Amino acid sequence: KCSAGCPVVEEMYIAPSEAIRYLQLGKPDIVLNSKTIWICASCFQCASRCPKGVEFSSICDALRAIVLRKRVSTPKKDADELSRLMVSDAPQMGVVGALRKLNG
């Protein structure tokens, strides 16, 4: 049900339900090394449809944080490279979210 409601599932390498299953099976590296966690739109549509109440968007946020902390991927954009005008006009969470998506 979660994958059927996802607006970006066709772009994902691993469907949300498959990613959850890999995590349950103790195979987080498969999910961490896929582009799925970076493609997630964080719209929570999957959570609203999930019969078990799993919030895949929140899990993707946590997995992105793990990748960034481990520096598994090399950041493509640095916060210092952003223009001062953009940072001053944009909401803080928007800037943080954009950096996470750009560095995925």
Image: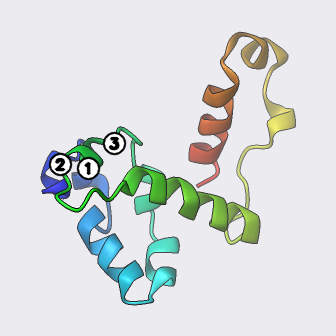
Visible in this render: residue 59?
A: yes
Asked whether residue 15 is in view, the answer is no
Q: Mark 3 and mark 2: span between their CA atoms? A: 9 Å
Q: Which residue is mark 2?
A: 49
Name the residue carrying label 1.
46
x and y percent of residue 101 in the render? 56, 45
Tell whether label 2 touches label 1 (CB within 8 Å): yes
Q: Is residue 66 above or below residue 88?
A: below
How crowded pointer 2 is (Cα within 10 Å; few <14, some 14-19, many 20+) is rated as some
Label 1 crowd (10 A; few <14 / some 14-19 / many >=20):
many
Residue at the spot 23% in from the left edge and 44% down from the top edge: 48
Query: Please, what secondary structure does the residue beneath circle 2 have?
Result: helix
Answer with mark 3 or mark 2, whichever residue precedes in sequence: 3
- Label 1 secondary element: helix
Amino acid type assigned to the residue bearing label 3 in the image: Phe
Return the mark for residue 44.
3
Decide which of 97, 62 is in the foreground and name it. 62
The quarter in which the N terminus is drawn is bottom left
Q: Is residue 41 left or right of residue 97?
A: left
Give residue 17's quadrant in the image: bottom left
Which kind of residue does numbered mark 2 sit on? Answer: Arg
In this rendering, the answer to whether 43 lies above or below 76 is: above
Residue 19 falls in which quadrant of the image? bottom left
How far apart, in angstroms, are the residues tagged by discs 3 and 1? 5 Å
Residue depicted at x 31% and y 69%: 14
The answer to whether mark 3 and mark 1 are in CB contact below 8 A is yes
Left or right side of 74 for 45: left
Q: Amino acid at mark 1?
A: Cys
Disc sitting over residue 103 in the figure: none
